[in-house]
Image (tube, grey):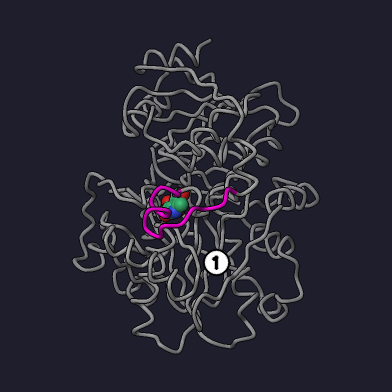
Amino acid sequence: MNYYSLNKNAPNVSFQEAVIQGLAPDKGLYFPKDISKLPQSFFDSIENFSNAEIAFQVIQQFVGNEIPEDELRRIILETLSFDFPMVEIEENIYSLELFHGPTMAFKDVGARFMSRCLAYFNRDKNQKNTVLVATSGDTGGAVASGFLGVKGVDVVILYPSEKVSDIQEKQLTTLGQNITALEVDGVFDDCQDMVKRAFLDEDLMFKNLTSANSINIARWLPQMFYFFFAYKELKKENKQLVISCPSGNFGNICAGILAKKLGLPIEHFVASTNINDTVPEFLKTGKYNPKPSKATISNAMDVGNPSNFIRIQELYENDLDNFKNDFSSYSFSDEETEKAILEIYKQSKYIAEPHGAVGYLGLKKELENEPNSIGIFLETAHPIKFSDSVEAILSVKLQIPKQIESVLDKEKKSLKIKNYEDLKNFLLL
Ligand SMILES: *Cc1c(COP(=O)(O)O)cnc(C)c1O
């Protein structure tokens, strides 16, 4: 399988090269050159397949022969070592819970898949890759856990000191081995700027730096899997499906749209955002106008210039009418989000966290136009990850799940850094 850069100014590369490089040399995101529909027979009998078999059928064309079949199957089994329950919280409204992985965030799926692909590509080499990521919270934990102990890969995570929750900090800083947490005296944007600078730094080329956010195809593509799992479960209802994704960098929803290109019968997508409404505005005005991000209670979606939007534009052939066929996008305030968390709890005794609640709001809005459909919103994190808001809104005390409990009494280990020179010196050690 070949991948091209969406900036169209770099050579095509293989799956392996795209995973190792992350971003193309012209700074474009990689995109698959060919996308083939899965055979109708696959959809006709999908209910007979295990999740791992479905995932294999879905991802195989994107990996090609670069990972042998038995290795790819093993990688998938390790990636999908937890459940993806669908919980009906109202008639015809489902929460697709993506938070049952080791760090209780959906990013576990992509991080686990990517780490194992990199490990496979490094299997006989002495060379190492260094994964460098900046995190405002959830990405860092998922990457740390996904890459822990993976051969041939060192992971360096930059996070803003005192700006992530206690649970998130523990998930980042307590693992040790090949994971190092750098605690930055600054905000998330400072971390992000340093990471970007390091990728461009000639002196660091020999470190084989790569990224592990959803710009990397090995983190993005496996996010298709759970859209197929949802279809497998609801197929028997014989109704049209509307799926709402709480969106920040738009990697998740972009994977859903790609799944539809493979033939998955999803009627409509909703990209639900907080007040960072660059995409909802684009659908209204036809103009893509990125803005600085604003802080909200659904902070993993505080993104003013979503990095995967360019992939969505490619999938819709840069045509606004194509977009409007099966894609809507709505934005919601923190007040609306808090109210939704409370109402969902009162009506259904279901505890949603702020990101899922934004997804729920977008879904409800879209279903006004399509009342006979089944609606699914993605619940992208466990409420415990955002316990400060959830407990305050609902006046409840959340139980701490065992995945989280196991890191809470481990010792935090981080290196404090102040500026880019500190980062560079660390990487050159
Ligand atoms: C990362 C994240 C999102 C946003 O996902 P994108 O793929 O970037 O749109 C939503 N919710 C949670 C909890 C996240 O961690």
Most common SS among magenta residues = helix
- The one nearer the camera, 199 or 15, is 199
| Dot 1 amino acid type | Leu
- Residue 221 position in % (x across, y down): 56, 54
Determine whether 277 is above or below 153 in the image. Answer: below
Q: Is residue 391 magenta?
A: yes
SS label for mark 1: strand
User: How packed is label 1: few (under 14 Cα within 10 Å), some, or many (20 or more)?
Assistant: many
- Residue 214 position in % (x across, y down): 48, 47
- Residue 330 position in % (x across, y down): 30, 67
**Residue at the extreme right:** 70
Q: Which residue is mark 1?
A: 96
Q: Is residue 15 magenta?
A: no
- The one nearer the camera, 79 or 22, is 79
Q: Is mark 1 within 8 Å of ligand 1?
A: no
- The one nearer the camera, 99 or 190, is 99
- Residue 366 position in % (x across, y down): 36, 77
Picture residue at 61% right of the left edge, 61% below the top: 225
- Choose top left, top right, bottom left or bottom right for residue 293: top left
- Choose top left, top right, bottom left or bottom right for residue 49: bottom right
Picture residue at 75% right of the left edge, 66% below the top: 50
Picture residue at 26% right of the left edge, 67% below the top: 283
Magenta extent:
386-400
Q: Is residue 163 left or right of residue 126?
A: left
Picture residue at 62% right of the left edge, 50% below the top: 101
Q: Is residue 349 left or right of residue 337?
A: right
Determine whether 310 is above or below 89 in the image. Answer: above
